[in-house]
Amino acid sequence: MFTNTVIVTGGSRGIGYEIVKLLLKNSYSVVYTYLHSNKHHNELVDIAQKNNVGCECYKLDVSNSEEVRTFKEWFVQKKYELVGLVNNAGIISNNLIISMSDEDWHNVINVNLTGTFYMCREFAVLMLKERKGFIVNISSTHGINGTIGGANYAASKGGIIAFSKSLGLELAKFGIRVNVLAPGYIDTDMIADFGDKQCDSLKKKISLNRFGTPEEVAQMVLFLANGNHFCQNTVITMDGGMV
């Protein structure tokens, strides 16, 4: 049985991986989900053992409601103590609106937005029973400002913000904290295909003149997890002062 357990979706790489790693180092047990590769699992288990906490992974398509429901049933059977949920799983499939296929639109919406809904619907029930817990939903500054060539991604991330605002209103009276992180350009696989000129151009628009790091996003998740704050229904942007 894991105590003080946080669920992190999309925890096998990028921002999610850093969130899992930092939580493990700060006395949280973690159950994280992945869909494709899980090459860092042994490393995460080693970190968990060194910090006397638990770490387990679960293969999951968050856009499939039956899979999410089965995951919850598995989690309950394990008798893990749930204290938090971080919805980080997300995909990108960019194209201009006039060229975007139905599949590209629906896939991004289904994973990023509907997946967040499915996870919150199932696991908020467990938090309600204990009258405590936190939920951090990972959005994006694109969900606030929009972006050229990524209307599906922007719509999904903007939807997460509106959804989280409503969820926070519903859950606050039960002692459950709901907040949103909206990162800007973070140095992950999602920007790995950017050319040098594009990266230089973007950095000139950022006051700190650099991309953010996954570790910095993880630090903010840890801050929200620890609960020493007055944040509820808050959207925290992390874009380095992009203008």
Image (cartoon, rainbow, N blue to C red):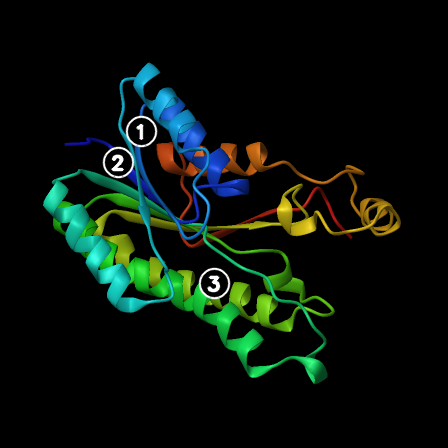
Check whether the beta carbons of the residues at disc 2 and disc 1 lie within 8 A of each other: yes
How far apart are the alpha carbons under marks 2 and 1? Answer: 6 Å
* Residue 213 pos. (x, y %): 63, 36
Q: Which of 120 and 178 is in front in this view?
A: 120
How far apart are the alpha carbons under marks 2 and 3? Answer: 23 Å
Question: Mark 3 falls on what kind of element?
Answer: helix
Mark 2 or mark 1: name the one nearer the start of the chain: 2
Residue at the (51%, 41%) spot, across then down? 13
Determine the image quadrant of residue 25.
Answer: top left
Which residue in the protein does label 2 denote? 5
* Residue 221 pos. (x, y %): 46, 38
Query: Visible in this render: residue 5?
Result: yes
Which residue in the protein does label 3 denote? 112
Residue at the (26%, 28%) spot, across then down? 54
Determine the image quadrant of residue 45.
Answer: top left
Q: Is residue 109 shown left or right of residue 53?
A: right
Which residue in the protein does label 1 denote? 28
- Quadrant, the N terminus: top left
Amino acid type assigned to the residue bearing label 2 in the image: Thr
Q: Which of 173 and 31 is in front in this view?
A: 31
Query: Visible in this render: residue 26?
Result: no
Check whether the beta carbons of the residues at disc 3 and disc 1 lie within 8 A of each other: no
How far apart are the alpha carbons under marks 3 and 1? Answer: 25 Å
* Residue 80 pos. (x, y %): 17, 38
Residue at the (55%, 38%) spot, across then down? 217
Mark 3 or mark 1: name the one nearer the start of the chain: 1
